[in-house]
Amino acid sequence: MAEIVLDHITKRYADGTVAVDDFDVRIADHEFVILVGPSGCGKSTTLNMIAGLEDITEGELRVDGRRMNEKAPRDRDMAMVFQSYALYPHMTVRENIAFPLKLAKMGREETQERVERAAGLLDLAPYLDRKPAALSGGQRQRVAMGRAIVRDPKAFLMDEPLSNLDAKLRVQMRTSISRLQKSLGTTTVYVTHDQTEAMTLGDRIVIMRAGLIQQIGPPQELYDHPRNLFVAGFIGSPSMNVVPARLEEGLLRTPIGDIPLRGRLGRAAEGPDVPRDVIAGIRPESFEDASLVHDAEEGGTFTGTVDLLESMGPEKLAYFTLDTGAVRSEHLSEAGGEEAGEECRLVAQLDPKSGARRGQPVRLWYDTQAVHLFHPKTGENLTER
Amino acid sequence: MNGAASGRASASRGASRAKGRALTEGQRAERRLGLWLCAPAAIIMVVVTGWPIVYSVLLSLQRYDLRFPEDKAWIGLSNYATVLSSEVWWNAFWVTLLITVVSVAIELVLGMLLAFAMYRAIVGRGLIRTVVLIPYGIVTVAAAYGWKYAWTPGTGWLAGLLPGGSAPLTERGPAIAIIILAEVWKTTPFMALLLMAGLAVVPEELLRAASVDGASLWQRFTRVTLPLMKPAILVALLFRTLDAFRIFDNIYVLTNGSQGTGSVSISAYHNLIGGLNLGIGSTMSVLILVTVAIIAVVFILGFGTAAPGSER
Amino acid sequence: MEAGRRSVSGWTVANVVVVLYAMVPVLWIASLSFKDPSTFTDGSFIPRKWTLGNYAGIFTNADFVRGLVNSIGIGLISTFVAIVFGTMAAYAVARLTFPGKRLLIGVSLLIAMFPQISLVSPLFQIERALGLFNTWAGLILPYITFALPLTIYTLSAFFREIPWELEKAAKMDGATPFQAFWQVIVPLAAPGMVTTAILAFIFCWNDFLFAISLTSSDAARTAPATISFFTGSTQFEDPTGSISAAAVVITIPIVIFVLFFQRRIVAGLTSGAVKG
Ligand SMILES: Nc1ncnc2c1ncn2[C@@H]1O[C@H](COP(=O)(O)OP(=O)(O)OP(=O)(O)O)[C@@H](O)[C@H]1O
Ligand SMILES: [Mg+2]
């Protein structure tokens, strides 16, 4: 168990690529931290630097206060689970799990005992004498986990450990990883590009983009208070709606109606260097079918024709096209929201009791206090500064 | 504790980044390890070929006959003049070229058929792949004696098929034909294996798609398979051409170069080991090396053959 | 159904043709080796009078036995050294970045294409000066040199197929670089190393040019060279029987390799050639 400190760490590859830039995080003992971000943002590089598989160009890595930069991977006492599982094909499951113990020159009996315990924990007991080639994807994944937990390392490092599994198995394994980590209490750094995994697993999430940390915080905080447009677009599914908006005297003019500048919106509008043209963001969850909302609740309304209606069971997703140009921002395209077309699209998540029909107009209510305002150039969230 | 917002950090350290291509400790260790691991192989290869090549060039510039060591003298390029104006050399050169071109051409066709058989056979694929390796693996000299006796009048089962009294190995044309036969027999399997590797890179779906589009078997071969196999074919041709050009063992056993059937390697050998004329022998060696280099360059530059090992 | 049966019989014919192609010349020399000397000149493909005398003859011939010993010894040593050095270099080529890597690949490519005859005259001189002429070492050195490009290509193709992550995983599991190499990479590359060793051995076993040029007596003369000297040495005796028996004997190891390692030899020859 350990506290891991990444002190202003930078990684520059031999070809000059800066893959990680000034990464500065303190990971507490027992903590489960998720590194998340789009492909190529430097997640694996960061993890490999913690593991010792990549050199640290600048900055310092400390584990329990001791500098680790120059230590070889085997002296760092961390275990890693790879996306491809990296099971040794010439060894049986038992030998795979026992390999770290064998290298540590652990006695035969204790090895045996530990392997059995790890196998029991992961339901691998029936497969101990098989070779990896004779296992299913989920079983292989568990063997990889077994190899990591068997020697009780200071930390688990996992690089997209679930991305080779099918959707259902992924959800299953997600829960069992979470449970395992809680019961072992081992500090864990987990890389994923899947925001659902990030939201459900982590104590804290580190969102990265192009080598830079965008925001760090517990999942709910990132959801409620995204620091910038990129984070807002990345966290949440379906993604936050963004529409062009204009600040006028006491009013925010948007394609879904004028919103009075009160409360946090008012404070945001009064901040320094706020341009007149901004981007307004509102989550699909902040909409509701107006007929199901009591008039007393404060908010705006907007009427539109439903392009498409998806019934998800516990909710309905209604899609609309607004008659303004789409918001274009590099901050968004990278966040992996659906590829914006020419038109401005809007998604609303409605109660299943809603009477919305495809091709029919519907009146929507939305929570005006849930609207975020973003700076169109820097992407900064004006409502959160 | 909290991370930096976007962009802020990068500007301040731009200066240190500009100068920074310096190697990290890990990269330096990797370089060192790489060099150490390669050193033994590299040293052996360079010492055993590098110095002899230089030495061979030096020898070619001298009059140096081991039977008359006291006549040893630097004579500039006159060995080259001697060799290049010698009818024996040019005869050997054209014979080598003829054997090379004809045998490689036959091997390409036969090898392609064989490659198809090995790749597509629905019955006995293992059998074909196994027996085909026997000509590849067999000691050339052993096989050459087989061919020699087969064509020796009286002894041979093949000679017996010819009109009475003919001794093919003592006539120039038939002897060269037999040399080519022995060479083709021995090396077609190798060609076929290289071509089979090329066949394996042709995606099955592509062939299916072509046949759905109405391409005949022949069209599928010429329009889909051949173009995709081109790199493999060129590499195979390059290897076999260079290999055929240095033909020695078969000729040594079958005719030992008599009746004008000697290759350049045979000529050089006779001058060196038989004649002990180091000057002339080395001159021939250098000329052969130059010819081989020209062939390689033509293949690589002219036909765009990917030099093996230049991957990615 | 009908078409299927027709293509099966078509392939059977093709198989027969290929087997005849490959085996007839080999069977011919085997047949010759079993013929009684009195029937050498009957021109028959199948011996009319069988004998083992030819084999008895060559195994009592000290020169040939010595040649076999030389061939085996020189072949094994050259193969071993080439595999050890070749494995090291191939691993570096496949996995590491270091200056001079392309140069190494280029040099080995040149050597693979190199006409051996061009080395014969200088090596003849140099080895005589160094006392290596007509010794095992005098043949082992050029054999290693010419086997190395083959080993480097074939093995680096094999190494490249081993996922890099396995090595990283081993490091994370606490292995030193050497342990990672020895306990994870080598076991996985072992089939490739066996293949490469066979190919290298076949190359050394086959060589004739160096064997006749760099030796002068049975101190180092290998079997193929010894066979070629059967001819001139005994004027009054017909060497046909001994030569064919000896040819069969030196072919046997190859046949054994081929029968046992067919798959691997094919994989080795093709992987090195295409990807290498
Ligand atoms: N060895 C290398 N040399 C140069 N650049 C590299 C190297 N390895 C990675 N990079 C670059 O560094 C950046 C970060 O790579 P990294 O593998 O950390 O991304 P990632 O966030 O893990 O992406 P993914 O989700 O696709 O795995 C990428 O732009 C990548 O191209
Ligand atoms: Mg990655």
Image: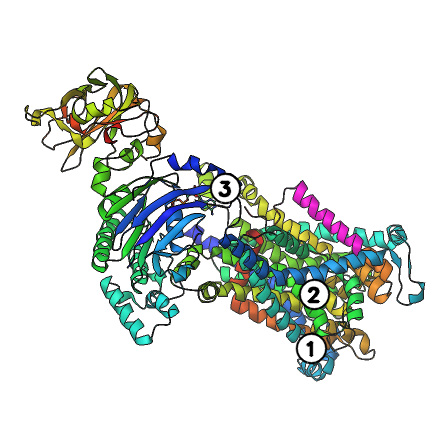
Badge 3: how crowded within 10 Å, few (<14), some, or many (20+)? Answer: few
Horizontal and vertical percent position of residue A275: 30, 20
Badge 1: how crowded within 10 Å, few (<14), some, or many (20+)? Answer: many
Disc 1 C-beta below 8 A from ligand 1: no
Badge 2: how crowded within 10 Å, few (<14), some, or many (20+)? Answer: many
Q: Residue at x 38, y 62 (%)?
A: C173
Report the image quarter containing ligand 1.
top left
> Is residue C30 rendered to the left or right of residue B176?
left
Q: Which residue is mark 2?
A: C142
Quadrant of the rendered structure where residue B182 is? Answer: bottom right
Q: Residue at x 82, y 58 (%)?
A: B282
Q: Circle 3 marks a residue in which chain? A: A
User: Which of labels 3 and 2 is toward the front?
Assistant: 3
Disc 2 C-beta below 8 A from ligand 1: no
Q: Mark 1 is on which residue type?
A: Lys
Q: Circle 1 marks a residue in which chain? A: C
Indicate which disc residue A16 carries. 3
What distance separates the C-alpha of mark 2 from that of mark 1?
38 Å
Indicate which disc residue C35 carries. 1
The residue stretch that appears in magenta: B285-305
Q: Mark 2 is on which residue type?
A: Pro
SS under mark 3: loop
Horizontal and vertical percent position of residue A238: 24, 34
